[in-house]
Image (cartoon, rainbow, N blue to C red):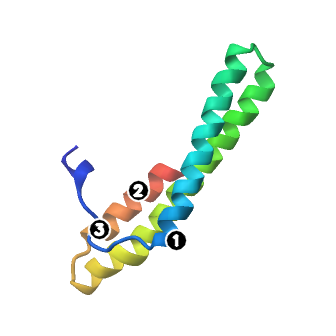
Amino acid sequence: MEDCCKIKKTPRDEELVNNLEKRINRISGQLNGVTKMIKENRYCHDVLIQIAAIESALKEVGFILLKDHMTSCVVDDIKNNDLSSLEEAIELSKKLI
């Protein structure tokens, strides 16, 4: 995966970065909570509900990042007659569904 280390041309808005960081920290806390629930032998239903909440929160982070990507990188590339990032965004959206 050579594309894993590209640097975004357009800097992310500080408010967006803070929002994403808070969400990711919350998700991290939820994951730690699930680990604790499993160690405590908590009821499967309760653990699975927490896992579903984590998955939903991760998807939301993904959609926020995809929106940022489309409104910055993709728009900039289209303005420069480069449609490759549009195709990339379409493929990325499939992964989030």
Classify residue 71 as left or right of residue 33: left
Q: Which is more foreground, mark 1 or mark 2? A: 1
Whether pointer 2 and pointer 3 mark residues with C-beta atoms closer than 8 Å, the reply is no
Q: Look at label 2 and name its amino acid.
A: Leu
> Horizontal and vertical percent for residue 47?
73, 27
* Nearer to us in this view, 53 or 77: 53
Q: Marks 2 and 3, Cα distance to the nearest angstrom? A: 10 Å
User: Circle 2 — which element?
Assistant: helix
**What is the crowding at mark 1: few (fewer than 14 residues within 10 Å), some, or many (at least 20)?**
few
**What is the crowding at mark 2: few (fewer than 14 residues within 10 Å), some, or many (at least 20)?**
some
Q: Marks 1 and 2, Cα distance to the nearest angstrom? A: 23 Å
> Horizontal and vertical percent for residue 68?
45, 70
Classify residue 47 as left or right of residue 80: right
Of the 4 image quadrants, the one containing the N terminus is: top left
Residue under label 3, please give it: 85
Looking at the image, is mark 2 or mark 3 earlier in the sequence? Answer: 3
Q: Which mark is residue 92?
A: 2
* Nearer to us in this view, 5 or 79: 5
Residue drawn 63% across the image and 23% down it = 35
Residue under label 1, please give it: 15
Whether pointer 1 and pointer 3 mark residues with C-beta atoms closer than 8 Å, the reply is no
Q: Is residue 46 above or below residue 12?
A: above
